Amino acid sequence: MIALLWHLAQAAPTGPDAPIPTPELVFQPILPELALCAAGILGMLYEAFARRSSRSVHLAIALAGLVAAGVTAIMLWSWTGAPTVLGDAVAVDRFSVVATIVLVLVAAFGCVYAWHESGRAEAVYRGEFYPLLLFATAGMTLIVAANDLIVVFLALEILSLSLYVLTGMGGRRSNEAAMKYFLLGAFSSAFFLYGVAMAYGATTSTKITTIVAALAGQTGSQALALVAMGFLVIGFGFKISAAPFHMWTPDVYQGAPTPVVAYMSAATKVAAFFALIRVLDVALQPLTWDWTPIVYALSVLSVLTGAVLAAAQRDVKRMLAYSAVAHAGFILAGLTSANTTGIRAAMFYLIAYAVMTVGAFGVTMLVATKTDEPSSYDSYDGLAARSPGLAALLTVFLLSLAGIPPTVGFIAKLTVFGAAIAAGNWPLALVCVLASVIAAYAYLRVIVRMYFREPRGAVTDDRAVVPQVAGLVLAVTVVVLGVFPRLLSGIIEQASILRW
Amino acid sequence: MSGHLLTVVIFLPLLGVLGLVLAGRQITDAGARWISLLVTLVVFGVSLAVLGRFETADAGYQLVEQASWVPAIGLQYLVGVDGISLWLVLLTTFLFPISVLASWTVTTEIRRYMIAMLVLETAVLGSFLALDLILFFIFFEAMLVPMYLLIGGWGGERRVYAALKFFLYTMAGSAFLLVAIIFLYAKAGGATFDLRTLTDTAATLPVETARWLFLAFFVAFAVKVPVFPLHTWLPDAHTEAPTAGSVLLAAVLLKVGAYGLIRFNMALFPEASKHFATPVMVLAVIGIVYGAVCAIGQRDVKRLVAYSSVSHLGFVVLGLFAFTQQSVSGGVLQMVNHGLATGALFLLVGMIYDRTHTRRLDELGGLASVMPWLLGFFLFAVFASAGLPGLNGFVGEFLVIVGTFAISHWLGAVASIAVVLGAIYLLWSYQRVAYGSVHDEHRGLTDVSAREVAVIVPVLALLLVFGVYPRLLTDSIDPATARVIEHVAPDHATTVVTGVEVADPGGGG
């Protein structure tokens, strides 16, 4: 499949009679994507031919694909071949390996959550769920490695289309969310594609490594390049849910099935941000002075919008959605430092955020399952008395999201603020820190409900073992990485170098 | 182990937490209480070992432990103790077992309560001992969560409001602190957060930059102290907190703010400290008078004690920023003394509340005839808090006022008047609680129990010991404060007020 995509990307002939050049096919770098797609297809075949498909078989197939993708990604850690392969369409570096592993892990948690949830609401979770999730993951792992804007776009579409369907799998409100997500997503895709066209116009190439050379040599039109930069940032802005492109986020997070939200809130952010880092810090590196003010402004808008609106919510999933906007702003603050420090800070923050948000949504999936409004704050009244385990888990995740030590969220904030201040942007850091105080209020409101209120009526929680163990693993990760951040930062240090 | 004495002190309470967590819900309430008491007592014992190994004459950091933590950003695990932090650590480790013992009456969710207490102890001790700025910040922030839970979970009627207010005020203050720390770190080349190294870096900063950074640090600590006009969270938090929460908040947590001023503001920004000394002193004096006046007007005993804290902490800040040997030593002394005296007051108010279930002055009265011992203890603590010579409150306030007079007669004079105000509200409130006619429903109340004697007598004993023989403290405080003054205001180091010998303020009265 990737080879085919590559042919499309290579469609510009160099002369009237020149045959389309055929790149050397190296499959190893795209083995993770191939493994994910293979498992996805296998899952679809199983769904088509099995008389009564079993969710456990689906889970097994999906996990097998994810494990294969993870293993093949780890094997790329010590890749010694060319930095870009398949006609420069795909980059092979530790940067993408780290992202792939994180994405695969997030997808595994998503699958386990879905497997559990489908035990409760069989009808909602059709067999296509797992293949779609795998295809989305394949798109994500491809986007973080893409070295050609066309491949970025294709990967973006692969993951987006899968996510639109996944979002719509949970009933009426979920259908509505999917429609909204689709419309705004299609809009952002158009922006992105237009940006790619502009970039091509400015530099006669869509290859990231060629664009950087062209811009550095100032051979192309600077004006076109700036327009391209603007459109690309807008396109990514939708995917990372940065304000003011965040409008879809609360509705989708509230409406979509919780396992899907747990998965997409973390995975989409990781994938889109890693791709954005490659575009900004490699392709548009010569325009650093032009894009940092934009990133700066987006960061300020996102942290303030996200934090203030999160504090005003009365629904946990909506609150977490707005907090996702604020967190996008924090990561952008790190990126204003357009160097390795900024990239490292953003990577650390993204991974930390993935752990916290997957954990937090995992808990919301289990709370007050039998009520009409399971994610309303009212359902969290007295959770600590009802299900102390769930309350404790959610508290850990919320404190980490608030950036209270000794959780990984604190170290993550420390590193992004450090990067921003090192780049001279201390006013931005101050805005971010103050916004995080407002956001802390939003998280505390939930903690207050859980610990200091009496339970309402006969609300029951789902206290199944498997998702609670998954949550425990994530909570332990939050604390361990908060106390020993070296475990993660050591890996990131080796992975934050982008070669071109 | 002996090489890691400070680490043991800081993290031993967490061992207790681990025990309580692992024990799960099977543990009985009594079990949870005794485990916590045992752990806090052992911590106190270990901190006495720290005192034993402390070299009194040495003004620098002692028992320093250093280990790389996050080498990528130069974050270290760096702890050490000097004459200033030593007594605050001992105050903390001394008051925690007392607070645990005072919490015997807590009946709901005792295991969680004790976990919060022990986590709080680790965070406070870490704040006093950390010499790496981020390590300090981590402990400083980590204090918020257990205290928030203690107030919000076991407090009075408006506990949720008070807890949230406490949390957000402090967190907003520390937002500035974090940015300032990182800024300083970036200026230093992004290599270390070591206080000792950053002190040298800060000296090379432009004057303007250093002044802004001073303000950022100051806001964070001023909220915590609290310095007028950032004190509004305090009366709510104190009033709504459970007894042990009030004790620890007043005796220990507020000291972290004052300690931050002397440890970080003065060490890092000596020029700015001097530059802003006058406005800070004026704020401190306003706080002293304002706290005292507000205390006079209170109807709730606990609120009254809370406002008295605002007033007393004003003395601490005034002393620290007058930069004379007497005033700074007096300020540090006042931190310890206020911790003990106000701790005692909150404990006794808690005991009275446990019996009468009211804290309103107009609903109390004549209790001295019903519970002579309890009210006797109360009178003792009131005298100490009001600064009666011979008890510890006198020494600190006296030194602060004397030291301030050397700098400014006006500020010294106003502060002295506030001492009288302090006597007024404290004695007046005692009079209303102890004398007058007894309310009928209070006639059958029992006097102090053996447990309560064990809670209060050690504290009262120290009030007397430190009042009669303050050299016990000042001998080790003076070298450290002398170093601070040398650093900030070398010209003041020689300002000795004639006729007053440091650490021996007019004998025992």
Image (tube, grey):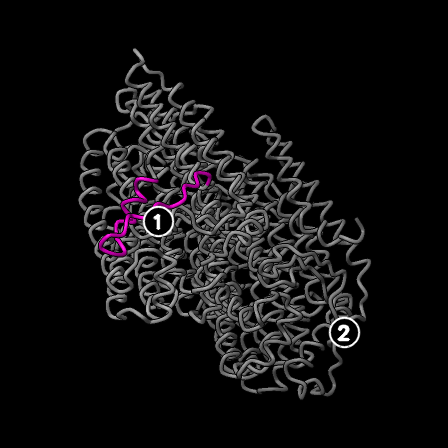
The circle drawn on residue B507 is: 2
Residue A468 % position (x, y): 46, 29
Q: Which element is circle 2 on?
A: loop
The circle drawn on residue A272 is: 1
Q: Which element is circle 1 on?
A: helix
Residue drawn at point x = 62 percent, y = 71 percent? B198
Answer left or right for B466 relative to A385: right
Three-letter code, disc 2: Gly
> Residue A289's quadrant in the figure?
bottom left
Q: Which chain carries label 2?
A: B
Residue drawn at point x = 18 percent, y = 37 percent? A176
Magenta stretch: includes residue A26: yes
Residue A243 % position (x, y): 28, 56
Q: Is B439 or A456 nearer to us in this picture?
A: A456
The residue mark sitting in front, 2 or 1, is 1
> Residue B467's quadrant in the figure?
bottom right
Tell me if label 2 and label 1 are in contact, CB under 8 Å: no
Q: Mark 1 lies on which chain?
A: A
Q: Give the range drawn in magenta.
A: A3-28
The circle drawn on residue A165 is: none
Magenta span: helix, strand or loop, mainly? Answer: loop
**Mark 2 surroundings: few (<14), some (14-19) or many (≥20) residues within 10 A:** few
Magenta stretch: includes residue A197: no
